[in-house]
Each structure stands twice: as C-alpha cells, then as structure tokens.
Amino acid sequence: MANVTNNRPLSPHLQIYKPIPTMVSSIVHRITGGALYFGTLLVAWWLVAAATGGAYYAWVQWAMGTIIGKLVLFGYTWALVQHMLGGLRHFMWDAGYGFEKHFSTKLAKATFAASICLTLLIWIVAYLIW
C-alpha cells in the first residue's frame, strides 16, 4: 500500500538506500561465496587432469596459463581472500565485537584493501617461486 500523502512506498527499497561500505561488503561477501563454487570446479578439473595423465594435464596447464586463464585464476584468488576476510569479520561479529558504526565501516574498507593487497602478494610470491 502506498503512502497517499507522498506517493511513496511504506517500506524502503534499494533506490532509497545509499550504498555504505558495510552494505557493499555484505553483498560482495555473498557474491564471492557463489563465485567460489565455480572456482572450486576449476580446482577439481585441475586435479582430475593431474590424475588422468600427462597429456591432459599439460592441456589444462596450458589453458590456465593463457591470459584468460590467468585472469580467471586471479579473480578466483581474490574471491577466496575476500570471502575469507569477510568471514573473519563475521566471526568477530559473532563473538560480539566490532558493532560500532565507525569501526565496522573502517573494517569493511580494510577488508577490501587487504583482499587486494593479499591477492597481489600471493601472485607476486607465486611468480617469484615459479
């Protein structure tokens, strides 16, 4: 039922809410959780290829080594790190800490920054070891 004085809905919706870091972090946490399902299929594919034989494994390694394959793997790495840090944030909330508005906003921003930095660090270390 609409509010007859202002012709607006009684309950707020996405067009009314202003995106804030904690809201965006929550949405990204859900999206990365879903993306991890598809990334885990890549890990399973790689393991099956390793168990199947040298030729198939070499083909999968080649596919993962292309620019598109590396971008997908980079995205999977970021999703994994982002989801892990978001999970730690939720774990902290479950323990009863970090509910203050300013702290939770800073923590949401720090989660994004840390996930990018850790993903880059993982890839730099991987290339140095390789």
Image: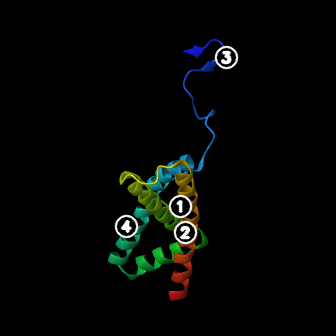
Callout 4 amino acid: Ala
Question: How far separated are the C-alphas under marks 2 and 4?
Answer: 17 Å
Q: In the figure, 130 relative to 69: above or below?
A: below
Image quarter hosting the N terminus: top right
Please identify, in this view, whether the residue under mark 1 or under mark 4 is nearer the observer. 1
Residue placed most toward the observer, 11 or 62: 11
Q: Taking the image as drawn, is residue 38 in sight? A: no
Point out residue 57 in the picture as x, y percentages from the top left corner.
Answer: 42, 78
Mark 1 or mark 4, earlier in chain: 4
Question: How far separated are the C-alphas under marks 2 and 1?
Answer: 17 Å
Q: In the figure, 8 relative to 17: above or below?
A: above
Whether pointer 3 and pointer 2 mark residues with C-beta atoms closer than 8 Å, the reply is no
Q: Secondary structure at mark 2?
A: helix
> Mark 3 highlights which residue?
6
Whether pointer 4 and pointer 3 mark residues with C-beta atoms closer than 8 Å, the reply is no
Q: Which mark is residue 111?
A: 1
Question: How far separated are the C-alphas under marks 1 and 4?
Answer: 28 Å
Question: How far separated are the C-alphas under marks 3 and 1?
Answer: 39 Å
Q: In the figure, 15 relative to 118: above or below?
A: above
Q: Which mark is residue 74?
A: 2
> Mark 4 highlights which residue?
44
Mark 3 or mark 2, earlier in chain: 3
Question: How far separated are the C-alphas under marks 3 and 2?
Answer: 48 Å
Crowding near pointer 2: few (<14 within 10 Å), some, many (20+)?
some
